[in-house]
Amino acid sequence: MRCPKCGCDESKVVDSRPSENNDAIRRRRECIKCGCRFTTYERREDMPLMVVKRDGRKETFERSKLMRGLLTATVKRSVHIDQLEALISGIESELRDRGIAEISSEDLGMMVMQRLVDVDKVAYVRFASVYRDFKDLDEFNEELRSLMQ
């Protein structure tokens, strides 16, 4: 790391610990040449997640878009927004941890439904009815039967 005071390329790490929100490593450094102390942060480089739509188009993953869908599914339900944030964060973390840069909208929808069923079953059915595009009441009833089992 280059010293902000003298520009020297050599420094030593004096202290290292996780940042406040655990998304980086905070390092206190000391310049070998002038003794200036400074702080650096080491973060994982996040590649943008891409969602491959049914028609083949690719879009950047947007938390807000997924949140809108979840808010619609949970309207008038006792689901706290923090639960939905955690659900989305969990999906995003899993994709990044698995090193996935692209995911189909079908697979993303399945990940949401797998988590949403544990949060609220009514919201799950609402989300599934839009996601799976039920054509008639029989498809809807089949989903309800599988949920009840």
Image (cartoon, rainbow, N blue to C red):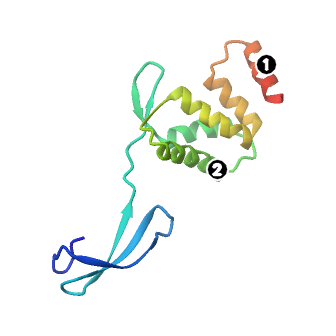
Quarter of the image for the N terminus: give it: bottom left
Residue located 76% across and 36% down the image:
121
Q: Nearer the viewer, residue 124 or 81?
A: 124
For label 1, the SS is helix
For label 2, the SS is helix
Residue located 21% across and 72% down the image:
2
In terms of sequence position, does the residue under pointer 1 or pointer 2 come before the other?
2
What percent of the width, then of the height, locates residue 141?
79, 19
Quarter location, residue 71:
top right
Q: Nearer the viewer, residue 85 or 18?
A: 18
What percent of the width, then of the height, locates residue 124?
71, 33
What percent of the width, then of the height, locates residue 48?
39, 42
Mark 2 residue type = Ile
Residue 44 position (above or below residue 141): below
Residue located 61% across and 50% down the image:
86
Q: Is residue 141 left or right of residue 32?
A: right
Q: Which residue is mark 2?
A: 81
Q: Nearer the viewer, residue 56 or 71?
A: 56
Quarter location, residue 127:
top right
Q: Is residue 143 left or right of residue 68?
A: right
Q: CA distance from mark 1 to mark 2?
A: 28 Å
Residue located 58% across and 47% down the image:
90
Q: Is residue 45 left or right of residue 69?
A: left
Task: Please tell me the numbered disc located at residue 141.
Answer: 1
Residue 30 position (above or below residue 77): below
Q: Are marks 1 and 2 in contact (CB under 8 Å)?
A: no
Quarter of the image for the C terminus: give it: top right
Q: Residue furthest bottom?
A: 35
Mark 1 residue type = Asn
* Pointer 1 local density, CA inside 10 Å: few below 14, some 14–19, many at least 20: few
